[in-house]
Image (cartoon, coloured by chain):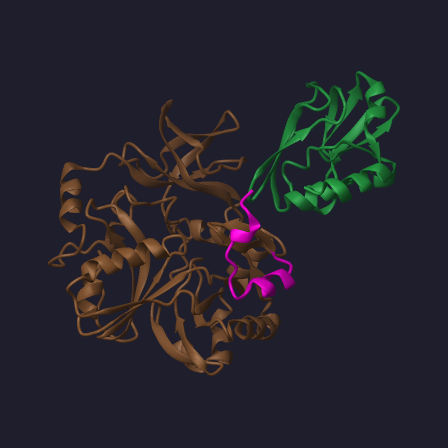
Chain colours: A green, B brown
Amino acid sequence: MANPELCKYSKTHEWAFVEGGVATVGISDFAQHEISDIVFVELPKVGAKVEAGKACAVVESVKAASDFYSPLSGEVVEINATLPNEPSLANQSPCDKGWFFKLKLSNPGEVSALMDNKAYQEFIKTAGH
Amino acid sequence: MTNQAVLSRTPLYESAVKAGGKMVDFHGWELAVQFSSILDEHKAVRSACGIFDVSHMGQVFVTGPDAHKFVQHVNANDVKPVPGKGVYSHVLNERGGVVDDVINFCLSPERFLIVVNSATTDKDFAWFQKHAAGMNVKLENASARFGMIALQGPKAPELMKELWPKSVEVSRFGIMEATIHGDEGYIVRTGYTGEDGCEIIASNAVIVKVWDELLEKGKKYGILPCGLGSRDVLRLEAGYLLYGQDVDDERTTYEASYGWVVKMKKPEFVGKEALLKRKEAGFKEKLTGFMLDGGGVPRNGCAIYHKGQKIGSFTSATFSPLFKRGLGVGYVTPVDLPMGEPVEIEIHGRRAPAKVHKTPFYDNKV
């Protein structure tokens, strides 16, 4: 679905693929690898307003819970309904079948604050975990 | 973060790193929390086999004419002087609380091996020394001499047969003395997973060889090196206590729902009188099992509600890959909640429906 190379990334390891005022979001491959063994995902509801940098979903692995921070602000227009039933998709296919939700951007200008793939790859090299 | 320099390493540290272990600080020991993935490791142990580095655990030898008298004195369970037999037990303090949960193995009526928890080894040894006063026994804390590997899973006996043919004749909780690569060693039919298998106690000098040959010969069965993460999930499913978390110096064996360990028919043991008094007074809390009805992952510390009232919290909780549900144990009041009684677990500020569940959650009759 989303080509990782064309995605934008947050410092909290979420990706956003922006197309025509709508962003599809999920967790990066780096994040799924760090979290490992994802067994539960709780998504926001369609219609929910989410804010960039604010926790709006929960990812639980066998060992720990992680917050998902929306990389951008807007209204949730669609969720990946398969994901809560098959949370391991977020491990197996973080940028494709494991997407989280789509949001209609309320402030498209925020996109420029995210990293492109090249910058993100550098970021994870230095930031690590 | 703890200063890395102060962490202890087991003789299998290099082997664990080589096998891809993600190393963490576990009570001062640098051990692998996982290798491949907790889910894969869990599956290997439930359906094939896995190995764990448990070298951090302690070994105490009790030798001398009063050896049996001594182990009976410090254990709430009845330790028989029958060579080759072992028994899980609680060592109690004078208040009836639990100093540690241990396994006692009889090597001869005058020689016993007590396997103790890692974080409590020094405390236990000091406790044993105190209670050996006036008895004709010699205590040796041999923990630094030995490494220990747990081989667990339904395929474990086949691998045991291949490597140490006589070890499969050892009954559950039994012990066999073995020469392992020319050194003193012991094979015990125990584990912390709820599966069949054994634990191999071998000298630091040869334990790496044992690890390597288990991985090599176990390949055909799908063996995986496993870490603390899967070990904790496996033991919780199998209803085993984690000392320091589910039971400690203050709680009693009865409150921990492990009353079967206490043998009040024994004429005496440390903590017996205090425990009797506490039992007569009645217990207000009991370690009880719960399983979630649906999604959500409970964690240690999550509050448990019954009819709107907080009745306790989890001491151990996790997602169970076996049941595909969250489950856990926690001390709750009242102590007599019936099986299936609905409760609610607070997770991330919300209440998830759950039910009282029997423990062990998983009983493979090993």
Q: Where is residue B74 in the image (x, y as percent from the top left)?
A: 22, 58
To which quarter of the image does residue B251 belong?
top left
Residue under the image location 60 percent in, 64 percent down: B14
User: Which part of the image, by quadrant, shows the C terminus of chain B?
Assistant: bottom left
Residue furthest out toward the left: B267
The residue segment tinted magenta is B1-21
Q: Is residue A55 left or right of residue A64?
A: right
Answer whether residue B257 is magenta in the image: no
Image vertical order of residue A10 relative to residue B14, above or below: above
Answer whether residue B10 is magenta in the image: yes
Residue under the image location 38 percent in, 61 percent down: B365
Image vertical order of residue B283 relative to residue A73, above or below: below
User: Which part of the image, by quadrant, shows the N terminus of chain B?
Assistant: top right
To which quarter of the image does residue B308 belong?
top left
* Residue A97 can be seen in this image: no
Residue furthest out toward the bottom: B182
To which quarter of the image does residue A121 belong?
top right
Q: Nearer the viewer, residue B12 or B256?
A: B12
Q: Position of residue A9 (x, y in %)?
A: 79, 33
Q: Nearer the viewer, residue A112 or B27?
A: B27
Q: Position of residue B326 (x, y in %)?
A: 49, 40
* Residue A85 can be seen in this image: yes
Residue under the image location 79 percent in, 30 percent down: A24
Q: Position of residue A87 (x, y in %)?
A: 64, 41
> How many numbered discs?
0
Image vertical order of residue B73 relative to residue B254, above or below: below
